[in-house]
Image (tube, helix red, strand yellow):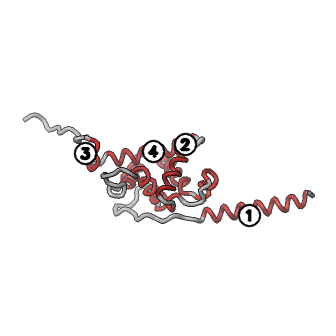
Amino acid sequence: MKRRLFFKYGLAGGAVLVLGGLGLSLRTGPLAPLPKSGLKVLNHRQWSTLVALAGVVVAGRAKLPSADDLNVAGMVDQLFATLHPDLSGELALVLNLLENPVAGALLDARPAPFSGLSLDDRIEAVGAWRNSRLAPRRAGIRALIALINSSYWSRRETWAHTGYPGPPQLGGAK
């Protein structure tokens, strides 16, 4: 093959890949309704990804309130506001990567936005992140899951299901 022809095919193939990646990156999932109190740190897309992720983390807990019922994503957004800006920025970046269909296609052969997946597909995607060979990917998803779980189980509505009677009442002796 002549060098000129090789470069011509290489450039054409590269252009196809770039255009395909651009097309994938323009795909977006559904936007979740914003909380009444507004967002503290996240943008609307990150919020929607967090709502979808919280639904996965809390899924399958029979007789327990859902993540939406307890506004778990809103609690996590408030927690982000209390973190160092660098840390909250990194966690927001993890949400961006989780949602991004190009990253999904490259890392998991999932060319769709996370928030647009079915619950079963979102569970599978989270499993791929948790078991990834890439340590930053594992650490990022585990940090988000920990924030979601701590927010969920800190709510009074979940205590009775675990046998936790609540914090002790301190009021002094009478």
Q: Secondary structure at mark 1?
A: helix
Q: In the figure, is residue 138 to the left or right of 22?
A: left
Q: Residues within 10 Å of mark 4 (few under 14, many from 20)?
A: few
Residue displayed at 64% across by 53% down: 106
Q: CA distance from mark 4 to mark 1?
A: 41 Å
> Disc 3 marks which amino acid?
Ala
Report which residue position mark 3 lands on.
160
Where residue 74 appears, as percent x and y from the top left, is 37, 55
Q: Position of residue 99 (x, y in %)?
A: 53, 57
From mark 1 to mark 3, how far is it between C-alphas? 56 Å
Farthest residue, direction top: 173
Residue at x-position 51% and y-position 56%: 121
Label 1 amino acid?
Val
Q: Residue 92, how many percent across, how many down?
A: 50, 52
Residue behind mark 4: 84
Residue at point 40%, 65% (across, down): 33
For label 1, count other residues whose C-alpha is less than 10 Å away and answer few (under 14), some (14-19) or many (20+): few
Please tell me how crowded label 3 is: few (under 14), some (14-19), or many (20+) other residues with Cα within 10 Å: few
Residue 131, numbered label? 2
Q: Secondary structure at mark 3?
A: helix
Q: Nearer the viewer, residue 163 or 155?
A: 163
Marked residue nearer the N-terminal end (2 or 3): 2
Q: How far apart, in angstroms, are the residues tagged by discs 3 and 4?
A: 33 Å
Q: Is 39 left, or right, of 102 in this rendering?
A: left
Q: Which residue is mark 1?
A: 16
